[in-house]
């Protein structure tokens, strides 16, 4: 079996922003890390292109839903290489291959007796594309996420028998279940189920922009059922002439934002059960990056622009900041001032300066060759178990904690430079062996933490490993060797220069 990680598919009624970058980079960190461990990895992202919000946005823009979807999907697809995302496929739900597979799965759900025709009446948010229960409505019949008045809708729809899965979902979401993390989000999902599940609309009769219902072509599938199935359908056509489902399904990790928890923790497993498909292993639900106390949202106009950050400071700096400032899984505030402080203090001074000093001292004191001395046992002990600790944390999708564990060793190496003072050792011929130990230990420690940092900062780590003459990224190399490797090192431009 391979390792399968997904982002949500991003809605094309607006352009990409920081929230989209955040989830994509998180998935990329996991994908790169697992590849380092020798796993066969499939990393999926893409765009969600059907439903009323897209149709309404197209109408406002004086264009067709398909034209709007093509235009904005291209922007999301272009974002991936800018973020250094190593996704294996980019799915678009307007792709007819996806639509055909949605129809196949949903026909199975229908044939299994989990649908019926009925009339829906209730409150609906056109931006969420979500019918709201009474407990999900803010003051004045407004959407708690978009702060807009809800619409009162009444229409004949096909329904999905969600209520039939009350007990299976209670078991799936029982206390201590690994299915949803963090625990607070598991509790939230369980609380929703405990209120009692009601059947939900499966189709919309008023829309034409969607995947037609095969047993009733006057209806299209409600956008969430179409969208959720992307995680399964993509595996059927991502590789020409090859079905990857047997290799990668069920998914190891679906990364989602907390605003789509209900759909992924409740609707999604129920739908899979209804179709007779295996459930994914885990949903990891991250919080919001906040500015001015609100979730970053294009519609609210409070966005830290990832494009501007990358242009001025580089992609790796953005990737690092995403998991350094706010613990992944929690809500937290971000700011341009906070970003600039992390860049200067941690990336430039602690890591970039450590790299520059180490290479410069090897060049100056040992002719650019790493000594083949045995490593300092005391410092090596501080690295014992680090690779295993990072792997265990990332297996639990604890990206910020794993980064902190690595960064503690970045700081330990900086302290080691001050403790050993190689510039003093270099002045005393009697300390030549001690200087060899210092430089070999620094070089090997720097190499090991750089291998561990690679998933977070792929560009900078490639540059540094190349300068060290040790470009290998295998996770085996994340542990310290017993001695310096004796190879030549090269020059290195500053990894995190002061922005112009």
Image (cartoon, grey):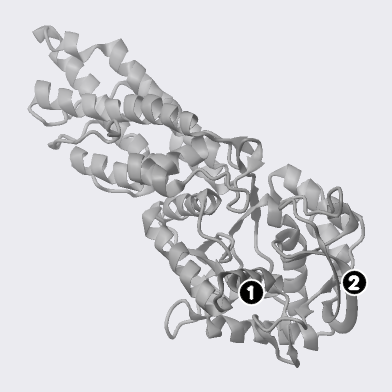
Residue at image position (17%, 12%) is 423
Q: Which mark is residue 121?
A: 2
Looking at the rendered structure, the number of numbered marks drawn on it comes to 2
State the image coordinates of residue 125 (x, y, percent, origin top left).
76, 62
Q: Nearer the viewer, residue 309 or 21?
A: 309
Give the crowd class for mark 2: few <14, some 14-19, many >=20 residues within 10 Å.
few
Foreground disc of the pair 1, 2: 1
Q: Nearer the viewer, residue 435 or 334?
A: 334
Horizontal side of residue 116 vs 82, given as left or right: right
State the image coordinates of residue 54 (x, y, percent, origin top left).
62, 71
- Check disc 2 and report its element: helix, strand or loop: strand
Could you tell me how far apart the alpha carbons at marks 1 and 2 are, in whole angstroms? 21 Å
State the image coordinates of residue 16 (x, y, percent, origin top left).
50, 57
Q: Are marks 1 and 2 in contact (CB under 8 Å)?
A: no
Residue that label 1 marks: 55
Q: Is residue 374 visible?
A: no
- Quadrant of the image occupied by residue 6: bottom right
Of the image marks 1 and 2, the number of the one nearer the N terminus: 1
- Check disc 1 and report its element: helix, strand or loop: helix
């Amino acid at each position: 079996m391979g390792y399968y990680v997904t982002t949500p598919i991003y809605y094309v009624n607006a352009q990409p922003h920081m929230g989209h970058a955040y989830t994509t980079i998180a998935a990329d960190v996991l994908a790169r890390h697992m590849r380092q461990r020798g796993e066969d990895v499939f990393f999926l992202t893409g765009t969600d292109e059907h439903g009323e919000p897209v149709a309404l946005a197209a109408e406002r823009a004086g264009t067709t839903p398909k034209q709007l979807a093509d235009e904005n999907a291209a922007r999301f697809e272009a974002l991936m290489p800018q973020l250094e995302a190593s996704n294996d496929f980019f799915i678009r739900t307007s792709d007819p291959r996806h639509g055909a597979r949605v129809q196949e799965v949903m026909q199975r759900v229908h044939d299994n007796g989990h649908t019926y025709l009925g009339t829906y009446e209730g409150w609906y948010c056109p931006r969420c594309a979500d019918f709201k229960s009474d407990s999900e409505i803010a003051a004045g019949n407004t959407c708690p996420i978009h702060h807009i008045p809800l619409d009162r809708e009444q229409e004949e729809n096909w329904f999905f028998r969600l209520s039939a899965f009350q007990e299976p979902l209670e078991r799936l979401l029982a206390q201590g279940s690994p299915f949803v993390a963090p625990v607070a989000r598991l509790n939230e999902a369980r609380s929703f189920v405990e209120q009692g599940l009601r059947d939900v609309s499966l189709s919309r009769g008023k829309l034409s922009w969607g995947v037609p219902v095969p047993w009733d072509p006057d209806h299209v599938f409600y956008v969430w059922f179409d969208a959720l199935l992307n995680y399964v359908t993509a595996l059927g056509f991502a590789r020409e002439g090859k079905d990857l489902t047997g290799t990668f399904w069920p998914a190891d990790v679906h990364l989602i934002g907390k605003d789509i928890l209900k759909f992924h923790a409740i609707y999604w497993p129920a739908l899979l059960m209804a179709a007779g498909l295996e459930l994914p292993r885990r949903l990891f639900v991250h919080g919001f990056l906040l500015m001015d106390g609100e979730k970053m949202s294009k519609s609210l106009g409070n966005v830290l622009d990832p494009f501007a950050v990358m242009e001025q400071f580089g992609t790796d700096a953005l990737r690092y900041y995403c998991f350094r400032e706010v613990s992944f899984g929690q809500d937290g505030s971000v700011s341009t001032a906070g970003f600039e402080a992390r860049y200067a203090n941690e990336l430039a001074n602690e890591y970039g300066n450590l790299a520059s000093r180490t290479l410069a001292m090897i060049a100056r004191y040992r002719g650019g060759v790493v000594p083949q001395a045995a490593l300092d046992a005391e410092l090596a002990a501080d690295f014992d178990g680090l690779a295993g600790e990072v792997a265990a944390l990332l297996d639990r999708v604890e990206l910020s904690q794993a980064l902190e564990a690595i960064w503690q060793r970045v700081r330990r190496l900086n302290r080691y430079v001050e403790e050993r003072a190689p510039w003093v050792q270099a002045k005393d011929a009697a300390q030549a062996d001690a200087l060899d130990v210092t430089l070999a230990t620094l070089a090997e420690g720097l190499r090991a933490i750089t291998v561990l940092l690679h998933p977070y900062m792929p560009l900078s780590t490639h540059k540094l490993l190349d300068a060290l003459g040790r470009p290998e990224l295998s996770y085996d190399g994340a542990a310290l060797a017993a001695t310096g490797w004796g190879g030549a090192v090269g020059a290195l431009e500053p990894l995190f220069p002061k922005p112009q």
